Amino acid sequence: MERIPILKMGPFLLVTIQVDLYDRLALGLEQDLVNMVSKTGARGVLIEISAVSIVDSFMGRIIGNIASMSRIMGAETVVVGMQPAVAITLVELGITLQGVHTALDVEKGMDLLLNKTGLDQLQKQEEPDEPAE
């Protein structure tokens, strides 16, 4: 069975979807992601969907489910790289991705995850003071 790889990056999980999701693959991703959040204690999930050209109501619901399940387990979810056509379709279908944060790209998504989890404050505290000029 085809699976979408889930990578661990520090306290976060990174998923890059490079194919259009069909129902069985989406359900497998949902199950795998929830298991990985539980297994790793991840604080955030970043889902990159720039290669996805179609998101229907089922896929919107799966993304919302992933965010809800992850939040219950203590992890925030950010979706990045959404194509304009996908965003338009979601709005036209009236699909709201409840509990899902969005950002334009991976860099902004990681910043958002750091902010939402409070880990950005920890990074600032750990950074050494800049030398005086």
Image: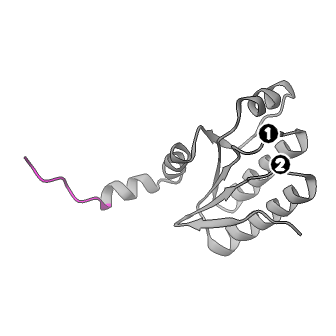
Say above or below: 40 vs 69: below
What residue is shown at x 84% (from left), y 24% (from top)?
A: 92
Q: Is residue 69 left or right of residue 123?
A: right
Number of numbered labels in the structure image: 2
What residue is shown at x 75% (from left), y 65% (from top)?
A: 34
Quarter of the view holding residue 72: bottom right
- Which residue type carries mark 1? Ser
Label 2 sits on a secondary structure element that is loop
The numbered dot on residue 20 is 2
The residue carrying pointer 1 sits among few (fewer than 14), some (14 to 19) or many (20 or more) residues within 10 Å by Cα, namely some
Label 1 sits on a secondary structure element that is loop
The residue carrying pointer 2 sits among few (fewer than 14), some (14 to 19) or many (20 or more) residues within 10 Å by Cα, namely some
Rendering colour mode: one colour
Furthest residue toward bottom: 39
Mark 1, residue position: 53
Location of residue 103 in the rendering, given as x and y in whole percent from the top left corner: 59, 39
What residue is shown at x 85% (from left), y 66% (from top)?
A: 2
First to last magenta residue range: 126-133
Location of residue 82 in the rendering, given as x and y in whole percent from the top left corner: 69, 38
Location of residue 73 in the rendering, given as x and y in whole percent from the top left corner: 69, 63
Q: Quadrant of the N terminus?
A: bottom right
Say above or below: 115 vs 3: above
The numbered dot on residue 73 is none
What residue is shown at x 85% (from left), y 63% (from top)?
A: 28
Whether pointer 2 and pointer 1 mark residues with C-beta atoms closer than 8 Å, the reply is yes
